[in-house]
Image (tube, coloured by chain):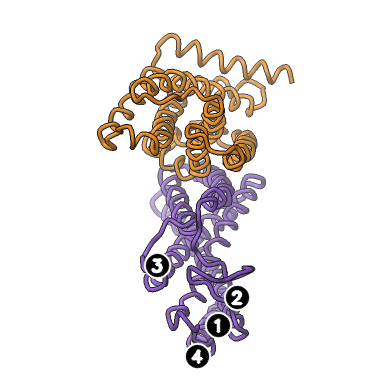
Amino acid sequence: MRNYLRTVITVVWKDIVGEARNKEILTSMLVFSLLVILIFNFALDLDVQAQESVTAGVIWVTFTFAGTLGVNRSMASEREGGCLDGLLLVPVDRSALYVGKALGNLLFLLVIEVIILPIYSVLFNVNMLVPGFLLVVLLGSIGYIAVGTLLAAMSVQARTRDILLPILLFPLTIPILIPAVKASIGYLEGYPGSWIMTWLNVIIVYDLIFTAIAVMLFEYVVEEWS
Amino acid sequence: MEEKPRFLSLLDGITGILFLAAVLLVFFYAPLERSMGAVQKVFYFHVSTAWVGMLGFFVSALMGGMYILSRKKIWDMIGFSSVEISFIFFFIAIVSGSIWARPIWNTWWTWDPRLTTAAVVELIYGAYFLLRQAIDEPQQKARFSAVYAIFGFLSVPLTFVSIRMLRTIHPVVIGAGDPTGGGGFSMTGPMQVTFFFSLFTFSVLFVDVLWHRIRLEKLESMMNKLRLELTS
């Protein structure tokens, strides 16, 4: 067990150090998110009235797109650098590698979210620092990254790697996007707690089921890593 | 050259007869629904094709699990073949549903939970084909499809639940307490007979087509092997 934890921490630490050196993932995710928000601003004409109904949607679309970008990049660099090759030779449980990669990806996405939410609040004059809403963002991101990390490990090994990930990932994450958007609207607009809870429950169930399966199936995705 | 199995030919015949009988039942035995009229008859094949679709997707997830555990190529073949068949059947279900929805709901499509879930399911398995296409190495292809088939099938109920929490207008015919509104109805005896007979017919049809598809896959790999031997 301690060995397992140490592997997880090592993988996360490796990702953080790598990111601190070249800042590739975070900068591209951040700029991309800002661009998406900018485009939405023009496309949806985000005035005060429109904002209320679409804020949650815009935020979640931004996070999903940025998440795909980050997850894809972090797996692609494993492949280019041959780092995972080395890690796979180490006699540790492979699921520990998955948990490490997923935590690293989650961390990057959370960093982006922490930066984007205040910016969005200032730009469009909405208060986003509602504790419940932040909880939804956290839970939604967990499920999204859990599935995304596993699918990215598959898609980077395929021929059409960059375009394949969103195609694989988006239809599978619809059950987390719908409740995440709904629960976000609930918190931002102050809907009753019981209404929000039903949506939160779906997110939690998704997180539990898909994290568990991803942990179990990861080793079949990376055997004979190419 | 592998001969076509006798039983497969027999099954072809049985399927043909069953299908003919199902069509006859739908048009001549099942009574006309009181308020919807003839268009309601699409229901029998609509539900049956949707059922075959879900059955095949379930089979593919099951075969995915079997492949991962045993690494036998045959499980991958069955899994892929059933996705291919189910993809088509599910598409037929969506189209036939649209044909029914036009006069009853006055629209070809609404974003109702079942309809939306059906669309998402088609997208998931469309992605499944793209995934297979993008990988050359056969074992890797089989492993990845197995993993994706398991993920895909498990996400379907959650998709359905989350979309269902938005309002639904799709009629619930089976196990419904109050089949009113949105074109719901309760089945009379002959309707039930026709309905279950159609379900049975399409299940047999699925097995028959699946068998053919697996045989085709086997013949294809045999042909590739022979071609390699000839050229080397």
Q: Are marks 2 and 1 in contact (CB under 8 Å)?
A: yes
Instruction: Say which chain tag 2 marks.
Output: B
Instruction: Say which chain tag 3 marks.
Output: B
Upstream in sequence: badge 4 or badge 2: 4
Task: Please name the color used to draw chain B.
Answer: purple
Left or right, residue B193 beside residue A67:
right
Q: Are marks 4 and 1 in contact (CB under 8 Å)?
A: no
Report the disc number at residue B200. 2
User: Which mark is nearer the camera, 4 or 2?
Assistant: 4
Instruction: Say which chain tag 1 marks.
Output: B
Upstream in sequence: badge 3 or badge 4: 4
Upstream in sequence: badge 2 or badge 1: 1
Name the residue: 44% across, 55% down: B119
Upstream in sequence: badge 1 or badge 3: 1
Left or right, residue B24 beside residue B177:
left
Q: Amino acid at mark 3?
A: Ser
In the picture of the structure, the residue carrying the numbered disc 4 is B28
Q: Are marks 2 and 3 in contact (CB under 8 Å)?
A: no
Q: Amino acid at mark 1?
A: Leu
Crowdedness of circle 4 by 10 Å Cα count: few (<14), some, many (20+)? few
Task: Please name the color used to draw chain A.
Answer: orange
- Percent x, y of residue B192: 61, 80
Label 4: element kind: helix
Q: Amino acid at mark 2?
A: Phe
Upstream in sequence: badge 4 or badge 1: 1
Q: CA distance from mark 3 to mark 4?
A: 23 Å
Q: Where A95 falls versus B134 (above or below)?
A: above
Q: CA distance from mark 1 to mark 3?
A: 26 Å
